[in-house]
Image (cartoon, rainbow, N blue to C red):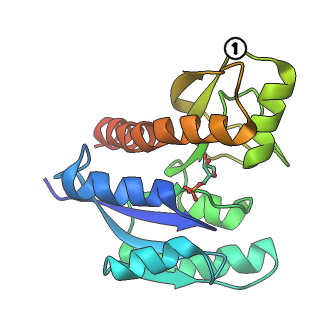
């Protein structure tokens, strides 16, 4: 069977992108999918450099409004004829044009057990700060479909981690990230297998 064609959008470090690329080359996505292109809304995203060094196609768009940015993304992504578009630390809201172009095939990873600690402003270290402030015993990560809300699409997979009494937002973030690197490729595998 032909390999499924994946695109990844990042805004920063891209460690989840790296996990996905590695999974496609020698992990659970091997023989099932390949990463065709990595795009960003931030030309300085560190992950773009890594992707270039891996000889992956990369691009960035610098349009400032959501509609203009999404239309530019659509143009850049079109030639790759993607089966799924994976958001991996992409810090922009996906607007109606991009949603429609990849209807039902845009996935995102979020560093909490959604629906808890999702929505506008719940990004990065703030998520882990909120979990600690609430005194929760568990946290984790979620892969979900992207819809027209923020972190509201259908949940495809979750992994939990314990919250420890000595945790700082940073130590909790690191524990959750380790699980993200397992969860994202595994959930993409299940998603692609179910849709083929
Ligand atoms: C991850 O915690 C992810 O869940 C969230 O943004 C962070 C991205 O980190 N959406 P990285 O760029 O993949 O290293």
Residue 118 in view of the camera: no
Give left or right: position of 30 versus 80.
left
User: Relative to 87, is 142 above or below?
Assistant: above
How many marks overall? 1
Check disc 1 and report its element: helix, strand or loop: loop
Pick the front one: 112 or 174? 174
At 61% from the left edge and 57% from the top edge, which residue is drawn?
Answer: 89
User: Relative to 51, is 181 above or below?
Assistant: above
User: Relative to 4, is 186 above or below?
Assistant: above
Q: Quadrant of residue 154?
A: top right
Give left or right: position of 18 versus 126.
left
Pick the front one: 121 or 98? 121
Residue 28, position in %: x, y? Answer: 25, 43
Q: Residue furthest top?
A: 137
User: Relative to 65, is 19 above or below?
Assistant: above
At 26% from the left edge and 48% from the top edge, which residue is drawn?
Answer: 29
Q: Quadrant location of the C terminus?
A: top left
Residue 160, position in %: x, y? Answer: 55, 22
Q: In which quarter of the image is residue 10?
A: bottom right
At 56% from the left edge and 23% from the top edge, which residue is drawn?
Answer: 161
Pick the front one: 74 or 113? 113
Residue 72 in view of the camera: yes
Residue 9, position in %: x, y? Answer: 55, 66
Mark 1 surroundings: few (<14), some (14-19) or many (≥20) residues within 10 A: few
Residue placed under numbered mark 1 in the picture = 137
């Amino acid at each position: 069977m032909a390999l499924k064609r994946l695109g990844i959008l990042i805004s920063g470090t891209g460690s989840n992108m790296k996990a996905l690329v590695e999974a496609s080359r020698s992990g659970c996505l091997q023989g099932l999918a390949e990463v065709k292109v990595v795009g960003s809304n931030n030309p300085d995203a560190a992950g773009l450099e890594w992707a270039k060094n891996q000889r992956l196609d990369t691009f960035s768009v610098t349009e400032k409004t959501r509609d203009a940015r999404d239309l530019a993304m659509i143009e850049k992504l079109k030639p790759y004829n993607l089966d799924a578009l994976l958001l991996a630390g992409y810090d922009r809201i996906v607007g109606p044009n991009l949603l429609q172009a990849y209807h039902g095939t845009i996935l995102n990873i979020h560093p909490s057990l959604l629906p808890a600690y999702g929505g506008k402003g719940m990004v990065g270290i703030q998520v882990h700060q909120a979990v600690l402030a609430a005194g929760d015993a568990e946290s984790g990560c979620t892969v979900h479909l992207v819809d027209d809300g923020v972190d509201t699409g259908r949940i495809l997979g979750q992994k939990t981690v314990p919250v420890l009494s000595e945790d700082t937002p940073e130590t909790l973030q690191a524990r959750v990230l380790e699980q993200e690197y397992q969860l994202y490729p595994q959930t993409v595998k299940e998603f692609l297998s179910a849709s083929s």
